[in-house]
Image (spheres, rainbow, N blue to C red):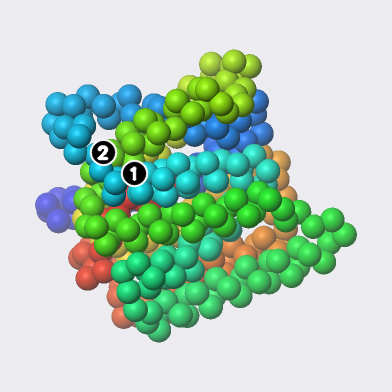
């Protein structure tokens, strides 16, 4: 087997693993929201665990002072605490499919908006077409869902919208300040833990004492290690081998996969409105019209973006 073919196969393995983590994030976060854990517990487990794992690396290789600057505080407040707390509150109030649509589906809109506001990134035809597909899907979903006697939209969906906007601002600032993705990940985890854990310990409600060790271990290991650290590394490695467009095509399927799995795993309904919303979101994210111009090849795209992945 040639080196390039082997590298390509490794890239596909990495992107499939990252896809599994992205889809599982929605399901496992919803499980946390339905458990005795509060959103503040899940946030603490996320950043506390990640900080403990990363601290030796930072102390012996990078230096902890490197991360305590005002830029790292800003990105930690947006891509760390802001995103995590809003998302976890959303998952405690709304179904997993709503998180898949509003958390992921609105991200292209906020990414385009923040890109224009923060780094003056221009819009092109493909972006407009993609956003139009997403807008149609979400609009159709909301219209169909609101025809029901008891609509299921509420504060959880508002939290998802806020989390999506927070993450978009975070990624735009990473580009503007040219922060390397590994440094950004370590800095966000450490600074978030330092800022958040004392406030959590002293003031925020907790159900941690009533949770089983299995629930705590699942959330700590998944949220703090797989999501924050491992998925970031596999995402970067996959983009380097396959290119941003190919990786993006795979990862755009994560919300659809999560919403589908939520039916048997969480016993949540997948209605026609939700299916239309997911279809519009996936079409807008995949942008299939670009496949004619940019076939799925292992070459790295000109628009390769190595900013840390969501979640």
Q: Find residue 147 and report its horizontal and vertical position in percent.
A: 82, 66
> Which residue is found at the position 57% from the left and 57% from the top?
161
How dense is the environment of label 2, judged by Cα within 10 Å: few (below 14), some, or many (20 and up)?
Answer: few
Between the residue at mark 1 and the residue at mark 2, the CA separation in whole angstroms equals: 7 Å
Is residue 82 in view from this perspective? yes
Q: Earlier in the sequence, mark 1 or mark 2?
A: 2
User: Do labels 1 and 2 touch, CB within 8 Å?
Assistant: yes
> Which residue is found at the position 60% from the left and 50% from the top?
159
> Which is nearer the eye, 267 or 309?
309
Q: Find residue 169 and report its horizontal and vertical position in percent.
A: 40, 59
Horizontally, is 243 left or right of 93 in the view?
A: left
> Which is nearer the eye, 122 or 305?
122
Is residue 286 in view from this perspective? no
Q: Considering only vertical position in the picture, is 85 above or below 212? A: below
Q: Identify residue for label 1.
A: 73
Q: Find residue 250 and report its horizontal and vertical position in percent.
A: 40, 58
> Which residue is found at the position 54% from the left and 46% from the top?
87
- As helix, strand or loop, the secondary structure at mark 1 comes to helix
Horizontally, is 12 left or right of 110 in the view?
A: left
- As helix, strand or loop, the secondary structure at mark 2 comes to loop
Q: Identify residue for label 2.
A: 68
Q: Find residue 199 and report its horizontal and vertical position in percent.
A: 49, 29
> Which is nearer the eye, 225 or 111?
111
Q: Considering only vertical position in the picture, is 112 above or below 168? A: below
> In the rendering, which numbered label is found on residue 281?
none
Q: Residue furthest bottom?
A: 125
Horizontally, is 258 left or right of 175 in the view?
A: right
> Which residue is found at the position 38% from the left and 55% from the top?
170
């Amino acid at each position: 087997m040639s080196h390039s073919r082997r590298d390509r196969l490794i890239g596909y393995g990495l992107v499939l693993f990252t896809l599994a983590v992205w889809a599982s994030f929605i399901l496992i976060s919803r499980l946390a929201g339905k458990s005795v854990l509060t959103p503040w517990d899940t946030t603490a487990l996320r950043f506390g665990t990640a900080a403990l794992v990363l601290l030796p690396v930072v102390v012996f290789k990078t230096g902890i002072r490197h991360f305590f600057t005002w830029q790292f505080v800003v990105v930690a407040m947006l891509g760390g605490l802001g995103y995590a707390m809003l998302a976890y509150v959303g998952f405690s109030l709304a179904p997993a499919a709503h998180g898949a649509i509003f958390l992921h589906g609105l991200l292209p809109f906020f990414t385009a908006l923040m890109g224009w506001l923060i780094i003056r990134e221009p819009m092109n035809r493909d972006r407009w077409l993609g956003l139009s597909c997403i807008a149609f899907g979400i609009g159709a979903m909301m219209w169909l869902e609101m025809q029901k006697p008891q609509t299921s939209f509420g504060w959880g969906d508002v939290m998802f919208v806020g989390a999506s906007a927070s993450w978009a601002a975070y990624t735009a600032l990473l580009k503007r300040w040219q922060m390397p993705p590994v440094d950004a990940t370590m800095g966000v985890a450490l600074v978030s833990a330092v800022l958040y854990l004392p406030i959590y310990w002293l003031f925020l409600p907790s159900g941690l004492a009533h949770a089983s060790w299995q629930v705590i271990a699942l959330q700590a290991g998944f949220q703090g290690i797989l999501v924050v650290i491992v998925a970031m590394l596999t995402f970067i490695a996959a983009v380097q081998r396959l290119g941003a467009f190919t990786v993006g095509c795979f990862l755009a399927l994560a919300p659809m996969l999560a919403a589908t799995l939520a039916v048997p795993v969480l016993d949540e309904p997948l209605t026609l409105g939700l299916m239309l919303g997911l279809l519009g979101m996936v079409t807008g994210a995949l942008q299939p019209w670009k496949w004619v111009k940019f076939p799925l090849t292992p070459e790295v795209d000109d628009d390769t973006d190595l900013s840390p992945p969501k979640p």
